[in-house]
Amino acid sequence: MARKASSTVVSRRALLRDTVSLAGTLAGLVLLQACATGNPPAAAPTAGSSASATTAPTASSSTGAAAAPTAAPASSPTPAAAPAAQGASTTEKATLSIVWRTSAGEEKVMKQLWSEFQQQHSNVTIDAQFATGCDVDKKVELLVAGGTPPAIWSSIACQGVRYWVARNKTVVLDDYVKRDKYDLTDFYDAVMPLCHWQGKLVALPALQAPTLLVYNQDLFEQAGVPLPPKSWDDTNWNWNTWLEQAVKLTKQDSSGRATQYAMGSWGDLRYSALRIFGTDWFDLQTIIDTGYPSTFFPDRETAIAALQFEHDAMYKQKVVPLPGEVQALQAGAPNLFQTGKIAMQQDLNFAFLSDAPVKAFKWSVAAIPAPVKLKRFNFMYPDQYTIIKPQKYEDWAWELLKFMTSPHGYQGYPIQANGGIAPRKSLSQDWVTTVQKLSGKTKEELQVAVDGMGIQQTAWGHPCIVPELWPQGIQPSLDKFFANEIDPKTAVDQIEAACKQVLAQAKGQ
Amino acid sequence: MVQSLASWFGGRGKLEAREEIAFHLFAAPWLIGFLVFTAYPTLASFFLSFTHYEVITPAQWIGLDNYLFVLHDPLFWQSLQVTALYAVGSVSLGVTFAFLLALLMNQPVPGISVYRTLYYLPSTISGVPVALLWMWVFDPAFGVLNNVLKFFGIQGPQWLFSTTWVLPAFIIMSLWGVGGAMVIYLAGLQGIPRHLYEAAELDGATAVTRFRHVTIPMVSPVIFFNLILSIIGSFQTFTAAYVMTSGGPANASLFYALYLYQNAFQFFKMGYASALAWVLLVIILALSMVVIQSSPYWVYYEGKLKG
């Protein structure tokens, strides 16, 4: 039987109607599902909800060998007391999520630490997710937007703790600290200001990474140049003496092409460009206090002189390669220093482990040269842990935070995981012992990093709440300056104008 | 079940209703995908472009502020200028080179298919590997380009490290993908009826005249197609700039899409990034409309009467 032609025709109106109906039905189903699976929020934690206080970190708990964390709970320091049975938050099973960066060394240690925590708290499960680089932050953003933030967060990727703090997304920890008599006195002074915001404790330190100078001992000896000193008090080791040595440490082939440079680069320009000469782009204290800078170039003349010095070292004395030369010099090596073509490089304490595989030449560490007249003003990167709101199991998140910031937690991360320095003063020798084993360097060499922490101040980008300040305010003019297109005074003027504009935009939004 | 559904579809015949249901069921995966992954994000971004939205905090309605801010944002204008210059350079060079290559590849010489393959091959690789490859090509010290220039006694520029040369570098690099357009031109060239050339030859037309009055008009719809695609593509340039320069030096390679990405995923200004996306849509739409409106003056459609 012949079918009617109309039987296979679907009118546009009908299609639209049916599509809308289908979408509506689906949306309804999703909504119902969402309502059905939603759990009621846990009772808000109270300062008095803990059964017992956490043991304050003591010298004895931190001076033991920093062996790799083991699965046995007995090997842990006194476990943090479980929160009192107060409502659903402590009696029901809790799943705590954590997002961490993908890193072979860290992943193993972190999983070990979290496994220990789970063994100590049988009704807690830790759901760990790993991501690469800045994707860690994107993942966390989505979890927060979905109302299920990770239990604890650390500034291990691109976002600083102030990003969350400035948006009122962090749990205030003062009550917990008071309740559990958590001892804050063991932390280095330089790392604590970043853990506070408007008088409240909103984070705890995770690690600190001080800067130092790594040098190729073979190249120094071949050039007959004295080795740089390890003491940060030695002010004879300044940028003038550095330049004298740098010239001797630079070599060119017969065609005039450099085969060896005194230094690979000026380091992380955001912080090192001016601080190694004793000044900065902004007033650090105001940024720490408010999140915004208020004064630009506190010492304008020194800043201009510093930039001129760096420029001359690249274009006149030619002891530092131009930006365009670095890729070819590095030629696939993990970093420029490891090529053996660089006599010195500003680096972080992580260099002890990252450069440990180098066997082709002898290398060591020293203090970064001092400013000729001003005081040393080197920087360090401080990382923090914080608890992002809203937490379904806030008490457990605090317990995990205490565990991670206990001496045992720090012995795992950062000491064992990546050779980072724990922010507890009492653990400085644990770091020396552990990294000495892993890197084969001497105690004297490792002590350079420990001593550096006493004088180094936080990188301004960490307390600053305007992430555009560097890429939009400073970097463009600095690019032009280091490409030999503008002079240092023009660069400074342009940077100030651009930064003011960025700040005005940021504050206006 | 079918009966009740059939009645819901308007009380038509059983077979008719079943076919309609089948249609909807088969169309549903695409429709749902379109609604969830295309239509909803598109509409949501339009709504968000009128808000201050940082993902972790609720969107705040700010009306036209994002669009007004666009006008006063120096980096918006910088990124637009970079992208427009790149579009002019890469589209004009790309269209010309692809067309010239297609003419060469259309010659009846032995082994031509090998050449066609060789010229098409680079366009099969794109994205990050190509960007990394060209970073080495443009290396000021050891790059192949500067070494070739050095052979001729020319001191090569700093390319990706120079505010002057970074954009020309990206334009040169864009020629890497001309193989794709070349194949389309080649298909167009091979579709030109032989008798048109024969008739022109009988009329005494030279090779240049035949090219101008037969080849170009007959291929003009293909040129038109490639032009539109190239313009759209050039305004969406992202990967190479992201990998090779991150917009530097001094924002000299800050492409529009990269600036949009930075706002969205580095500074988490989703509202502003959404506004930038809609402005980009309008720009691309306007340019496409200009090209489409101009097409009656230079695109020849066989069989279409003039006027």
Image (spheres, coloured by chain):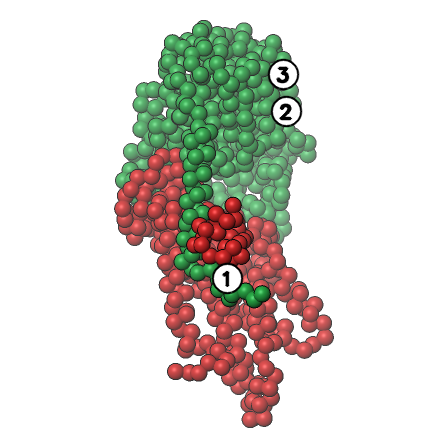
Q: Position of residue A362 (x, y in %)?
A: 65, 30
In the drawing, what numbered circle is on residue A71?
Answer: 3
Q: Chain of mark 2?
A: A
When asked about the image quadrant of residue A230, the answer is top right
Depth check, mark 3 against mark 2: the one in front is 3
- Image mark 1: chain: A
Instruction: State how far apart marks 3 and 2 are (Cα).
Output: 25 Å
Q: Which chain is green?
A: A
* Secondary element at tag 3: loop
Q: Are marks 1 and 2 on the same chain?
A: yes
Q: Which mark is residue A7?
A: 1
Residue A499: image quadrant is top left
Query: At 64% across and 29% down in the image, what residue appears?
Result: A356
Q: Which numbered disc flags the more N-terminal residue, 1 or 2?
A: 1
Query: In the image, B292: left or right of B141?
Result: left
Q: CA distance from mark 1 to mark 2?
A: 79 Å
- Residue A304 appears in the picture as rendered: no
Q: Residue at x 48, y 64 (%)?
A: A6
Amino acid type at mark 2: Ser
Q: Earlier in the sequence, mark 3 or mark 2?
A: 3
